[in-house]
Every structure is written in structure tokens, then in C-alpha cells.
Amino acid sequence: MRNRIWGLAALGGVLLSSTAFAGTCKSMVLYENGSSAGRMEESTRSFPEAPEWSANWGDFEGMKSPYVRLSGMRNYRSDWTGSLVFDALPATVQGGSLKLKVRSTQAANFGVWLSGAGGNGKISFHALAAGKAQSLEIPVADLLGSGNVEVDKVGIGLFGVPANQYTTLFVDDIELTCVQEGGAVAAAGGTIGGTAAGGTDTDVGTAADFSPYVFVDVNPASPVREGLFEDVYERPVKSRYSASERLSLKGKTQAHFVIPEESQLQILGIKDADALSARESWRGWYASLFLVEKGRLEEGYIPNSKRIFEEAQTIASMSDYTTLPVLFADVDYGVSYCEDSTCAKWEIEDYRLALAGIPTPCVHASKVRLVYDPYFTVTPSGRLPRLEFCTAGRCLELNPKSEGVLEFGSAGIQEILVKIHLENQTLEQKLFVEVK
């Protein structure tokens, strides 16, 4: 359970701020002891409960009430994030640091970031000990880049919160140490640093418009996926072959999977379809992998595709289907073809399946973020091609560990043309999704 979605990067200690700033700047308190107005954006909040802005649960070491309190519990392991908006923002910051005090009732991975004119910046991660208040100070340059940068919001999150664990986070004394004198918001001059983004059409929007996404650290060729929300790793697909049949087939092919012709026709009916219902398209990725895995000749060669499919759906649902992990499979297998009407003789032909998918049949917005995270891939060879998703006259190009925004032209059933750029060829596939 060490690698988790949205935030399982290396935990950092307290970062010291830089003391050399260009020009004149002043400190700006955004929130202190309940005296500053603020709110959390509902569109970015995944904390189970809304924040309490003037909570008084007593004084903690270095943290005096009132303060912001965020609490809750879920029945699955998850990340809790949200963007804080204050009356003093937006402001132009000229270096300096972001300072704040935090306390968690449980040991937790805490992340904080800033949002500006260019979107969300990098996340700074900190290990919080249970029941201990900590004062954090992070250079703005580490969050949003150097130079004069605009700060609009302060993002906070608890990452990898265990299932069925009630957790409370307290936040207080939020401050920017070097805000440009005069109060005017200048154009951001720094470089915005966030999670990797590739191929985004600027007319459509950028992935920085969404809550931060941190990629799971996994070798795409590894058959092991630790599980994002559960520790139990079950293999739900029963092999179609007995032990003796597997042994016989292994003597005839080097393939790790062998499927009958009728199963291959079902896979091709999904992969090469010019028209599918949104539900058929959504189920197509897992339905195809199910048929392949059912023909396995040995155990543990690929990860549990059902688990990956369900976890991608959970991640999508946590963002109200605005962030969609891309499902991808690149698997070699054999297809057994009968050579006569009685199938007394048959031959095995090699086949390579490259198939993409998305984890929902419908979305509720005209723009969605696609994330190409290797965790959601099934590729024993480790091959991860460049992918393009085209709709409404625009194409979004994604490389592994990148993300971007796809825009739909209208409501209703929409066709997405997927281009899979392999070593020396490009394969095409169509996905269908309903925009409501």
C-alpha cells in the first residue's frame, strides 16, 4: 500500500524559505485564528465533510483556536483535497514563502500547493505525526516558480487516508511572506510547475484547471498492482483450461495465452467497431482482457485487469467523472483456428492486441481530463506507446505519465478516435461516450 494515486511521492521535510528577495515586499496573512474570511471551492473538494472555519477544540502546541477544521471518514482508501479561497487573494508574490500550521489526529501524508494564473503548481508533501502540530514554511519558488507570480488559491490535501478511519485536519496561520507592495495583480512571470502534461490544446483548457494528480510509481511491465483501495489481490477469472490442457498447449506455442477463434471474433468486434453504445464501449476494454486472461497458460503473467478497471472507475467517480484514467493494454497471445469442420486439427496464430479504454460510459461536462498513468495499463513487455484522442476536430496527444484536457463539441453520444502509435505503425480505434 505504499504507492497511491494523487500524492504518493517522496515525503519532504520542512523547507526553509529564501531570504533574498528582489524589490519591496510585505507579509500578508490569509488566515489567522478565525479572523480572515475564507471558503473551500466545492468543485475541488473531496474532503468528506465541509470545513469548519472557526473551530475551537482547544489549543495545541503552537496552534491556538479558532482554526480551520476538516474531518471525515470513507469506507475506502482515498485522497482528500480542496482549494482554499481567501478575501486577500489574488495577490502578486515576489518570492518569499508560504507559511502555515497543520495538525492531524492521525499520522498522515499532507500536501499543500498554490494556484495562480497558470493553474495549479507543484505539491509539497509533508509527513504529519498523529496529534502533533507542525509549522511549515515552503518557498513559493518551489511551488509556482521564480519571479513575480500570481497566487489565487491555496490547495491542501491528505493523501492515502485509510478506509474506515475518522481523521481530522486542523489548519491555521496561513501566510505569504513576500507579497508585492501596492496590491495590484501583475502578470505572472514565473514558470508554473505541476504534474506532467502533454499535448494539451490551449484553446480547450489545460490540466492545471483540475485538482492536482500525482502518478502512481509502478513498472508498467510488472504484473503486481498493490491495490489503491483494498489490500486483497484476487484473481477473478477462471482459466478455460485444465492443468493437462495447459501443459499440452505449452508444447505447441510460446504464447502465454491461447484463445479460441470465437473469443477472438468478440475482441475484434470491440476493437474494430465503427459504432457501439456508450456502455458497450465502456465495457469493451475489460471484456477483451477477460477473454484473453481466461486463456492463460500460466498464472501471474499480467496484473488483475478487473481490479485495474474498477479502480479506474473509482478514481473517475471521485472527480465526478471529470478526471479519467486512460486504460491501455498491449498483450501478445495466440489464437487457435480449426483446420477442419470437426476441429480435429487446429493451428495457433500469434496476435498482438493494443487496446485503449476509458472508465465510464458517460460524463457530465464538456471538458474532461485524460490521465495516461502506467498503473492503469496491462503491458507485459513494458511497451507504452504514444496515444492520441481526437474529437470535435481536435486531437489530444498523450505520452506515458502525462495528462491533458479533451473537449466534446456537443451533448449526446460522442465518438473518440484513438490513435495508438506503436514502434513503426499507427493503429486506430473508436471509443464512444455519452455527454450529459
Image (spheres, helix red, strand yellow):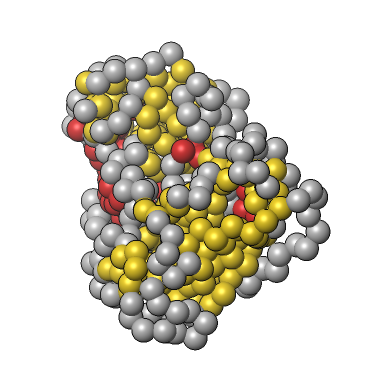
Q: Is residue 336 above or below residue 140?
A: above
Name the spot of residue 357 as percent of width and height, x first: 35, 36
User: Does 61 sit above or below residue 213?
Assistant: below
Q: Quadrant of the N terminus?
A: bottom left
Horizontal relation, residue 17 to residue 264: left or right:
right
Residue at the (64%, 34%) spot, across then down: 187
Q: Nearer the viewer, residue 67 or 436?
A: 67
Where residue 373 sits: x, y (%)?
Answer: 48, 46
Can you name the residue that lies furthest to the front here?
A: 182
State the residue at coordinates (56%, 37%): 117
* Tally of numbered discs: 0
Where does the image place residue 109, in percent across and percent down from the top left? Answer: 48, 69
Q: Can the viewer see residue 255? A: no
Quick check: 146 above or below 428?
A: below
Q: Residue at x 57, y 75 (%)?
A: 135
When asked about the image quadrant of residue 104, the answer is bottom left
Comparing 290 with 244, the one in front is: 290
Residue 270: name its quadrant: top left
Q: Nearer the viewer, residue 77 or 375?
A: 77
Question: Nearest the camera: 10 or 2?
Answer: 10
Image quarter of residue 137? bottom right
Q: Quadrant of the C terminus?
A: top left
* x and y, in percent, of residue 68 in the image: 38, 67
